[in-house]
């Protein structure tokens, strides 16, 4: 069992997938606090509906990044959080929080990192013309979407895809792999060696993928 704090900024579908996995017994974690930088984030409603404590930290009250993160850190510690889970939290994390939870902050990102870090990445993937996109759960370091990778899920790009349709299919995979990554952490199966993350007692998939499927 691991005590987690979830940081959100928006709709919170990833938060919901974690709540659902915990309630279904697929993820041995307890959400101690949900912290938002936006008072109107729908994620807060999701948390309250499940009796989970929430906190809003407004940027206008803590305009300096370090002061904001010190307040986040204070609240996480106050709630006994062991693992910090960024779920659509649209802020860069400073050294204050990184040092407070060294390699104990996870993020989910809707691309196959290190391709397409940053924002509007599904459109960027389509515009580039990649045949596969997907999502990545990684530990957070001091770069942009650059920390050690824990799990990736691959989503084939279709000719008729728009940024919205591709985002929807990637989101389905996000909802699957984020609770899994938390579960692996909870089971103590994650080992970080430099940039590489090893999952004890895990197997790679049996085969490779090609897109499009050519039968010649
Ligand atoms: C998700 O697609 C997540 O991967 C992305 O924001 C969305 C949040 O959705 N995060 C990032 O782009 C972080 N760089 P949600 O609020 O419904 O979970």
Image: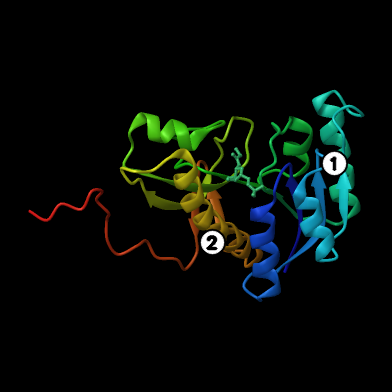
From this view, report whether residue 162 is shown above or below residue 44.
above
Which type of secondary structure does the marked residue at label 2 adopt? helix
State left or right for residue 22 relative to residue 135. Answer: right
What residue is at 80 percent from the left and 26 percent from the top? 65
Q: Farthest residue in the bottom direction?
A: 25
Give me the disc on residue 39.
1
Q: CA distance from mark 1 to mark 2?
A: 27 Å
Residue 14 appears left or right of 112: right
Q: Residue at x 74, y 30 (%)?
A: 94
Task: Find out whether the residues at labels 1 and 2 contact each other: C-beta distance under 8 Å.
Answer: no
Picture quarter with the N terminus: bottom right
Picture coordinates of residue 114 (x, y %)? 46, 35
In front: label 1 or label 2 = 1
> Residue 172: x percent and y percent?
51, 57
Left or right: residue 83 compared with residue 17: right
Residue 73 appears in the picture as rendered = yes
Residue shown at 86% from the left, 53% from the top: 54
Instruction: Please provide percent x and percent y for residue 103.
Output: 65, 45
Element type where label 1 sits in the image:
loop
Task: Please report whichever mark, 1 or 2, sits nearer to the chain's N-terminal start.
Answer: 1
Is any atom of residue 151 visible in this view?
A: no
Q: Please tell me the numbered disc located at residue 176.
A: 2
Q: Nearer the viewer, residue 99 or 28?
A: 28
- Tell me which corner region of the image, top left, top right, bottom left or bottom right, holds residue 28: bottom right
Mark 1 Cα-neighbour bin, 10 Å: few <14, some 14–19, many ≥20? some
Respond yes or no on whether mark 2 lies under 8 Å from ligand 1. Answer: no
* Tally of marks: 2
């Amino acid at each position: 069992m691991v005590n987690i704090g979830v940081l959100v900024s928006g709709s919170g579908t990833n938060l919901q997938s974690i709540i659902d996995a915990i309630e279904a017994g697929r993820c041995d974690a307890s959400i101690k606090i949900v912290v938002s930088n936006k008072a109107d984030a729908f994620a807060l409603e999701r948390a309250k509906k499940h009796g989970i404590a929430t906190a809003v930290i407004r940027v206008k009250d803590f305009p300096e990044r370090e002061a904001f993160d010190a307040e986040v850190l204070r609240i996480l510690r106050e709630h006994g959080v062991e693992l910090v889970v960024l779920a659509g939290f649209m802020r860069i994390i400073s050294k204050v929080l990184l040092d407070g939870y060294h390699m104990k902050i996870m993020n989910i990102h809707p691309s196959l990192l290190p391709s397409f870090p940053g924002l509007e990445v599904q459109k960027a993937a389509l515009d580039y013309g990649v045949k596969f996109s997907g999502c990545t759960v990684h530990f957070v370091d001091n770069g942009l979407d650059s920390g050690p990778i824990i799990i990736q899920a691959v989503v084939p790009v279709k000719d008729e895809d728009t940024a919205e349709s591709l985002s929807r299919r990637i989101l389905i995979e996000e909802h699957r792999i984020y609770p899994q990554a938390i579960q692996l952490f909870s089971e103590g199966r994650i080992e970080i060696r430099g940039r590489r993350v090893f999952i004890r007692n895990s197997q790679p998939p049996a085969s490779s993928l090609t897109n499009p499927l050519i039968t010649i």
